[in-house]
Image (cartoon, helix red, strand yellow):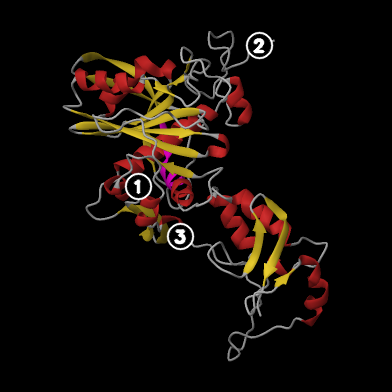
Amino acid sequence: QVLKWGGPKTSSGVKWNPGNPKDAWYVCEANGCVIENGDKEEFLPLGRWVAKYPERDIPGFHLSGLYLPVGRGGWGMLAAEWEAAQGNPEKLQTFVNTRLAEWWDHEGGSKLDENALLKRVEPFTLTPPDDQEPTAIPVRVQLITMGADVQPDRIEAFLHGWGAGEESWDLGVGVFYGDVTRQEVWDTYHEFRRKMWRHETGLRMGVTASCIDARYLPDTVLAQCKPYFKENCWPIMGVSATRGKPVPVWPRRPKRRRAKTKDMPTAIACDWYPIGVDACKDMIYQRLQQTDKGPGYIHLGAHCDAAYIAQRTAERKIPTLIQGRIVRTWQNKKGARNEATDGANYAYAALKGWLASPNHKLNEDLAEESGLSQTSANPDQSVRTTARTNRPSSRRRENSAHDGWFPKKR
């Protein structure tokens, strides 16, 4: 038989106990017997090449890393690399191409089972129906980011929590109806953005960073964000890959635009951030397929009903002819709403913007430094991790009031 990698849904292939990949073994496809990595010394010399297409004149050869001799890298090494690649499409593609010697399915990350996602919904939410109280923020959430989408008649804001290894939680949705050129709609939005919620530890937690789409009414959005830059309220515009050239999730430096509105006749200069929405979607759609809780896993809250899940899975990556080249691009299903997809992209970009500072990271130490441990349960203490942050910039500013972001000159 041909050695196959298998997977969590197959009874054969490479298997191991979660969290302990070094002891991986192989389950035979024919009769279910267990084969240890050391047994390869006996059966590899007995192997032979078998032609899949004997009628072809030019032979090709395929051999995966499962056949590596003992001492050159075993099944335990492959299992460890597989675990390390979960939640990271780039690493996963490298593993499939170089270790398994297989083609990478570029569309695989966009094929999501809506019913399976609905079964994963958990009881937490910060935005329940009006007659219910918000639940506490799950204990492993270390900070919250928000992604907001602007429509002609409303602003939709999506709250996402983040923990170690970028494990995430869809925490809630706020929708603010009205003419988005009027100040009262923005006042309601900013009130929601600055709100504090109860954490399971007993602390109060607010939004650390937020991104809001400025593609529609850019001058209005930029003017509304400028006074709140110190609160990490960032205007962004999504940028797709050009001719297959990827765009990073968060840019090295912002762009600048002179904004002018009817309520602000004198134009003001505002920074905005181009974000790589294709890179966001590649990462998020891949992580939605992950079924094992831990780094990269996406938890769905009680507010994630069928309509929300439909928005979360509204796009597909399909081949498109652009300037004579076949490029795989993300496209929305015909007639489908995708605000939840956009909100997740922008919340992820806000996380990357916050992590752009070398002083910021997501790990267990951050939870302890912020007071977010199960032993800290002072309900009068509030946590908003923007205390030492300012908007990201590639320029080094010295002797700044925000010394937590840029080191002083020595």
The residue mark sitting in front, 1 or 3, is: 1
Residue 409: assigned label: 2
Can you tell which quarter of the image residue 137 is in? Answer: top left
Question: What secondary structure is marked by label 1?
Answer: helix
Label located before the other in sequence (1 or 2)? 1
Task: Look at label 2 and name its amino acid.
Answer: Lys
Q: Is residue 328 above or below residue 170?
A: below
* Closer to the camera in the image, 344 or 19: 19
Residue in view at x 83 percent, y 62 percent: 71
Report crowding for label 3: few under 14, some 14 to 19, many 20 or more residues within 10 A (C-alpha).
Answer: few
* Closer to the camera in the image, 318 or 271: 318
Label 1 and label 2: CA atoms lie apart by: 46 Å
Q: Is residue 275 magenta?
A: yes
The residue mark sitting in front, 1 or 2, is: 1
Q: Provide residue 115's location: percent of width, then percent of height.
A: 35, 56
The magenta span reads 273-281
Image-based side of 196 in relation to 21, left or right: left
Image quadrant for the N terminus? bottom right
Q: Which residue is mark 3?
A: 108
Label 3 and label 2: CA atoms lie apart by: 49 Å
Task: Look at label 3 and name its amino acid.
Answer: Gly
Image-based side of 105 in relation to 256, left or right: right
Label located before the other in sequence (1 or 3)? 3
Q: Provide residue 326's location: percent of width, then percent of height.
A: 42, 61
Residue in view at x 79 percent, y 71 percent: 39
Image quadrant for the C terminus? top right
